[in-house]
């Protein structure tokens, strides 16, 4: 390759922090070790059989390009789920757009809205956080204002601290509740307040609700589609975690019809609609709730085992009300990376909080994705390691 000039967006792309950890885990495997991987949030649960069957029976002899708007029956199935789950009525034609999983839309939404030349050059995103809103904003030529999540404030950002000049330059406020990595849940009143502020300032509230179905208390977490006035509001959701379908790539964005209409104009150019057979399997997934209850029960069982071992050793687990993540305080005065590397020596893989931004220092994130057996084995290992740490 000679003389090729890369765009400023591309030049700003940084390595994913997990890459180095992945290399270390691969090296451990090459030595014949079998690390238990709580690092990346990729469920090891089986995709329910009826969903796999729906996929197989949807494969046809001939194949056609999927339409960018997605199958009407998928949009109807999503609207039905939204009505049952959030008690909200959403028009399947005007207010729902199927997406290829949810990461692509989290990344690309900034391209729809940022306009640095016109003074709209900022995206507001919570930190520590899922890195994609920030990466998407930077790729689109914008800058990011990080709104710190602290344990003292229940991992909710202080919207009061955002000045009018920042609001004036902002295009999107990203929220992600239930939250990755902290596992915190936001009350509906907070989501309503955020939506009202966004409307006042002509900003889009984008609510990434990828973990909305993984909850453990008596009450499911609220979502922004419950807000009475959905002007400037979008919800993003996915089957990845709810239905253990990360490999299928199926999600949706729903909300303000003006923004959905713009997405409909843009998306035929990028070819990011899920395959038709995936969309048909997705209809089956959204229409069933029994498998989601089973999934929650499985995560609840793993969570109990891990919370027990931390409680026995007086290790603080903050947030962690929902999602399949535990946000676990680092013992002593080590950094989160040092603690993660120490645990790797014991064949336990966790993500250092600093991977999610400097605001995540002091914690490690454990994705409860290994099987129950492996979680029980991990709890035994942790029992020994923590006994030594506190000795
Ligand atoms: C907060 C958050 N949003 C979105 C996603 C993307 O999920 P998918 O693209 O599989 O729907 C993830 C994946 O880990 C996530 O943690």
Image (cartoon, grey):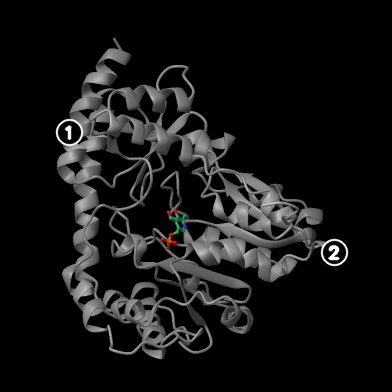
User: 317 or 357: which is nearer to us?
Assistant: 357
Q: Position of residue 185 (x, y in %)?
A: 43, 52
Relative placement, left or right, of 98 versus 369 is right
* Kind of element beneath mark 1: helix
Q: Quadrant of residue 267?
A: bottom right
Relative placement, left or right, of 384 versus 390 is left
Please identify the residue farthest to the front as the structure is shown.
Answer: 2
Q: Residue drawn at (52%, 65%), measured in percent from left and top?
A: 104
Q: Position of residue 270 (x, y in %)?
A: 57, 75
Q: Give the mark, 2 or 1, whose residue is nearer the N terminus.
A: 2
Q: Which mark is residue 117?
A: 2
**In terms of image quarters, where does ligand 1 lie?**
bottom left
319 is higher (above) or lower (below) than 89: above
User: 313 or 388: which is nearer to us?
Assistant: 388
Relative placement, left or right, of 173 versus 275 is right
Q: Quadrant of residue 287?
A: bottom left
Q: Position of residue 68 (x, y in %)?
A: 51, 83
Q: Is mark 2 within 8 Å of ligand 1?
A: no
User: 297 or 382: which is nearer to us?
Assistant: 382
Find disc 1 in the rendering and name its residue. 377
* Residues packed near mark 2 inside 10 Å, few (<14), some (14 to 19) or many (20 plus): few
Q: CA distance from mark 2 to mark 1?
A: 55 Å
Q: Residue drawn at (47%, 40%), measured in percent from left and top?
A: 19
User: 178 or 17: which is nearer to us?
Assistant: 17
Q: Residue drawn at (37%, 84%), measured in percent from left and top?
A: 74
373 is higher (above) or lower (below) than 139: above
* Kind of element beneath mark 2: helix
């Amino acid at each position: 390759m000679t003389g090729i000039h890369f765009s400023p967006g591309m030049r700003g792309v940084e390595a994913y922090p997990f890459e180095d950890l992945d290399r270390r885990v691969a090296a451990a495997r090459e030595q014949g070790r079998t690390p238990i991987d709580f690092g990346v949030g990729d469920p090891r649960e089986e995709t329910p059989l009826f969903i796999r069957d729906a996929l197989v029976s949807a494969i046809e002899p001939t194949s056609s390009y999927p339409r960018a708007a997605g199958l009407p029956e998928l949009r109807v199935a999503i609207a039905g789920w939204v009505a049952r789950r959030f008690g909200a009525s959403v028009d399947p034609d005007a207010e729902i757009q199927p997406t290829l999983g949810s990461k692509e839309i989290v990344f690309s939404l900034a391209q729809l809205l940022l306009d640095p030349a016109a003074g709209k050059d900022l995206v507001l995103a919570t930190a520590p956080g899922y890195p994609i809103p920030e990466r998407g904003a930077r790729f689109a030529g914008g800058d990011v204002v990080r709104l710190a999540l602290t344990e003292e404030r229940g991992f909710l950002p202080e919207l009061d601290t955002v000045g009018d000049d920042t609001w004036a330059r902002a295009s999107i406020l990203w929220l992600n509740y239930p939250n990755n990595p902290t596992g915190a849940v936001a009350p509906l009143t907070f989501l309503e307040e955020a939506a009202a502020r966004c409307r006042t300032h002509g900003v889009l509230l984008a609510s990434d609700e990828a973990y909305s179905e993984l909850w453990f208390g008596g009450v499911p977490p609220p979502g922004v589609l419950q807000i009475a006035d959905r002007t400037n509001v979008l919800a993003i959701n996915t089957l990845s975690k709810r239905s253990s379908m990360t490999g299928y790539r199926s999600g949706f964005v729903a909300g303000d019809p003006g923004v959905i209409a713009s997405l409909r104009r843009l998306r035929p150019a990028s070819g990011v609609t899920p395959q038709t057979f995936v969309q048909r399997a997705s209809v089956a997934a959204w229409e069933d709730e029994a498998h989601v209850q089973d999934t929650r029960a499985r995560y609840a069982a793993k969570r109990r085992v891990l919370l027990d071992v931390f409680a026995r050793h007086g290790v603080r687990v903050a947030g962690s009300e929902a999602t399949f993540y535990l946000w676990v305080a680092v013992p002593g005065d080590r950094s989160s990376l040092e603690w993660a590397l120490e645990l790797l020596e014991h064949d336990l893989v966790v993500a250092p909080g600093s991977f999610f931004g400097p605001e995540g220092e002091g914690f490690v994130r454990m994705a409860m994705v290994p099987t129950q057996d492996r979680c029980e084995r991990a709890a035994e290992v942790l029992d020994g390691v923590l006994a030594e740490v506190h000795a």
